[in-house]
Image (spheres, rainbow, N blue to C red):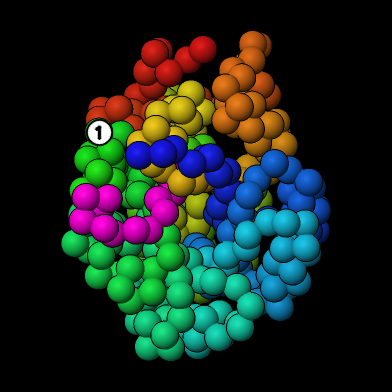
Amino acid sequence: MTATTLELSLGPVLFYWTREHYEAFYREAADWPVDAVTLGEAVCSRRRDMKLDDWLGIGRELAQSGKRVTLASQTLIESEADLRDLRRLCDNGEFVIEANDQSALQCLTDRGLPFVGGAALNLYNRQAIAVLVRAGMQGWQAPVEMSREALSTLLDDCRAHGVAAPCEVFAYGHLPLAWSSRCFTARRHRRPKDRCQFVCQKYPEGLALRSQEAREVFTLNGIQTLSGACQDLRHELPTMQAMGVATARLSPRPEGMAEVVSAFAAARRGELTAPDPLTLVDASLCDGYWHGHPGMSHHPESAP
């Protein structure tokens, strides 16, 4: 197998930022060494600062800067209003959709549109990937809890059976673990979900949930639960490329993201600099799932 150049991508912003923050972030991102950007609200339909037209406008600007742009669908569809928004998203006519649930899959396949399979689709085997490739899937994301060994076996199986679809791995950021119809951030403030007053916007990097031993176990992000620690697979990029992974996804953070991208770009070139550029971001690190261990663990062999 001939290894191709590993791409870097920016995933959608999972947290709730202000319009000004989104606009400033993507103005900077236009000049970052990433090959692809996924835009849109993938978590909660109540986050309405950015409309579809706003995301399309940012997408056009990023496309003019040479980025490949994808629009993310919402991961948890809860109402007819959510379905109407999903149909509008699928009918945008400009950008490919990242399908994050079965509703999006149905909508896109009914229209005969190409799509990307999000990690929340839970694609664990070659047969499922092959079915979606035949339905128009152009690429897919590995489930965040899939180990390096399991993914390598799956990619080998796909190649052996002629199932061709680029694979993306979640390489940096708080890991998306679960979604619920209940808003945990609103509950923390003793507010009902439908009158939340958008309190999650007060936490541009989520709300840390600590154990009694003061360990950050989870990060609460409205209806979404993320890992407490931040996944860092920067030193695994050569392994990913050798396995045949196409893209390493970096999940946006509100501060220090330019340094994170720079560090991953250097790692892609084989340059692991010291001191560690990622110490500019204040977060504990994890890589356990990748090594087939509990997700919150961090392995010293991954450090420079």
Position in image of residue 202 (x %, y %): 66, 51
For the point 51% across and 71% down, the residue is: 97
Element marked by disc 1: helix
For the point 21% across and 50% down, the residue is: 160
Position in image of residue 276 (x %, y %): 62, 16
In the drawing, does residue 65 fall left or right of residue 167?
right
Q: Is residue 288 above or below residue 63?
A: above
For the point 70% across and 66% down, the residue is: 59
Point out the image quarter for the N terminus. Answer: top left
Observer-nearest of 297 and 98: 98
**Which span of residues is magenta-colored?**
158-170
Observer-nearest of 211 and 18: 18
Observer-nearest of 261 and 241: 241
Q: Is residue 132 above or below residue 276?
A: below
Observer-nearest of 217 and 43: 43
Q: Is residue 164 magenta?
A: yes
Mark 1, Cα crowd under 10 Å, few <14 / some 14-19 / many 20+, is few
Q: Identify residue for label 1.
A: 149
Q: Is residue 92 magenta?
A: no
Number of numbered discs overlaid on the protein picture: 1
Position in image of residue 34 (x %, y %): 65, 45
In the drawing, does residue 209 fall left or right of residue 279?
left
For the point 77% across and 57% down, the residue is: 65
Q: Is residue 91 above or below residue 75?
A: below
In the drawing, does residue 253 fall left or right of residue 170?
right
Can residue 130 be seen in the rendering of this structure? yes
Which residue type carries mark 1?
A: Glu
